[in-house]
Image: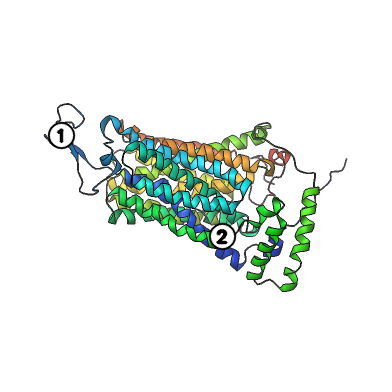
Amino acid sequence: MEEQKKVSRPDPIIIHLGDMGRYQLLYCLLIFLAKFPSGWVTMSHMLLSAKGEYYCEDGKDVDPCTEKCKSATFNRTVFTETINMSFDLTCGRFWLSSLSQFLVMGGIMTGAMIFGVLSDKYGRRIIFIIECVVQLVFGVIAAFSLNYPMYALFRYLHATATGGQMTTSFVLIMEIIGPKYRETMNILYQIPFNLGHATLPLFSYFLRDWHYFYLSFSSFSIVYLIYICVIFESPRWLFATGRLEKSIPIVEKIARRNGRRQENIEQIRPQMEEAYQQLISSDTKKKSSILDLFRTPNLRRNTLIMLYEWFNVCVVYYGSAQFISTLSGDIFLNIFISGILGVPGTIACVFMTRYLGRRPTMIISNGISTCGFLVIACITILNPTTVVVFAIIGLFGASITFPNAYLYAGEIFPTLVRTTGLGLCSCIGRSGSMIAPFVTSDLALYSPIIPPTVYAACAGVGFVLTFFLPETKGRIVPETIEDGEALHFRKTN
C-alpha cells in the first residue's frame, strides 16, 4: 500500500518578500521596543517592595510586630517610599507584597489568553494598539494608587495589557519573516525583556519613591502611540481570513521597499489569489483539541515533560532574580547584573541550539542552574559575595533555558495542536512564576536555604527529564498527531 506524499506549497507571503528583507528587519526592530515593558512590569516588584529595615522606635531589642512596641517605622536610607511602607505591608500583612506579584504574573497569563483570542478574531494591529493604550492608562493609574486594593487591581490590569502585548507583538514578527530566520528571531526576541530588566535599577536609583519609579517606566508606553502610524495589519492574517484586497497591497508595499523588481511585484496579485483558492479548496484541515496532546504515549510523555520544563524555568528564572535582589551588597548592582546577564545567555542559546541541538542545550543550562543553587543550599559557610556569584550562575543557566523552551516546544508539538500546546505551556509556566515570590520572600522567613534548595530541585528534575525528550534539531517539524507521536528520545532521525 503506497503512501501519498503531500506536496508542500510555497509560503504565499514569504515567497514575495524573502525571508528577511531590509524593511522586515526594520519593522521587527521597531516592534522589539514593545517587549521592554514585559521586563519592567514583571521584574519591578523587586524594587517596588525593596526591603527597608522595619524596627521599633522604643528600642532595638523590641520586636516591632509585638504589642510591646508602641511605635515602629522603616529605615528610609536607601528608599524613601516602597509599597511596604505606603500600605503597611509588615508583620502579618507581609504576604500581601508577594500576593501583588502573584497577581502580576496572573495578569500576564490572562492577557496572553484573552488578547490572543481577540487578535485571532479582530486582527493583530487593532488589538496591539489597544494593548499599548490600555497599558499606558492602567500603568499610570497604578503609580498613583491610594491603597493596597487599588494597587493590586491596577497592577493586575497593567500586567494583563502587557501579557497581551507580548503575545501580539511576537505574532506580528513571526508572521512577517521567513523560516530561515524565524528560529534566530524567536530567541533574540527575549533580549528586550532582559534589557528592560537591567534598566530598572537605573530608574530606581534616581527615583527612590515607588510612585515616581513606577510612573517613569509605565509612562514610557506613550511612545508606543507611534505604532498607530507605522504598524500595518499582518498580511498573513488578512490572507488567512480572506481579506485579499487588504493583504495584497501590504505585500506589494513591503516587496517594493525590500527592493524587489517591478516584474516580480506585478506577479504578487495573481499568485496570491491562486494560493488563496488552493487554501479554501484544501480538505486537509482537521479539528484538534487539547486532548490530542495526551492520547498517544510518546506525544503524551513529550507534552508532560515540556510542561514541567516551562514550570521549572519560570520558577527558577523569576525566583532567582528576586532572590538575588534580597542578597547582601548593592541592590541596584545586583538587579542590574541579574538582568543584563540574560543578554549573553540569550546569545549563547542561539549558538548552542544551532550547533549542539535543543536537548543538549537544555541539559547543560538546567545543569548550570542546579549546580549554582545546590552550592548555596549545601555550603552554608559561604561569604555573602560568593552566594551572589553562585546565584548569578544559577540565573545564567535559566537565561539560556528560557528562550530554548520557546523554540523546543514549537518543534515538538505538531502543527495541528502547536498553538494549543504552546498556550498550555505558557499557562503552566506562569503558574510557576506566580509562586516564585512566595518561595523567595515568604518561605525564606523559615530558613534562608529554602529558596536555593527549591530552585536547585526544580532545575535538577528538569535536567533529568530532558534526557527523555527527543532531539528536534534538523528534523522536519511535525504536522500531524502521527508525526508528533513518531518523535521519541531514542530515535536520532
- Which colour scheme appears in the figure? rainbow
Labels 1, 2: front one: 2
The tag on residue 231 is 2
In this view, the residue farthest toward the right is 1
Q: Can see residue 309?
A: no
Q: Which residue is mark 1?
A: 71
| Distance Cα–Cα, label 1 vs label 2 | 56 Å
Amino acid found under the numbered disc labelled 2: Ile
Task: Give x and y (percent) for residue 15.
Answer: 71, 62
Residue at the outermost left position = 58
Which residue does the image show at 54% across and 52% down from the upper left?
128
Looking at the image, which is closer to me, 304 or 460? 304
- Describe residue 71's horizontal placement relative to residue 118 as left or right: left
Across and down, in percent, residue 6 comes to 80, 49
Residue 209, x across and y down, in percent = 27, 49
Image vertical order of residue 342 relative to residue 470, above or below: below
Q: Where's the N terminus, which quadrant?
A: top right
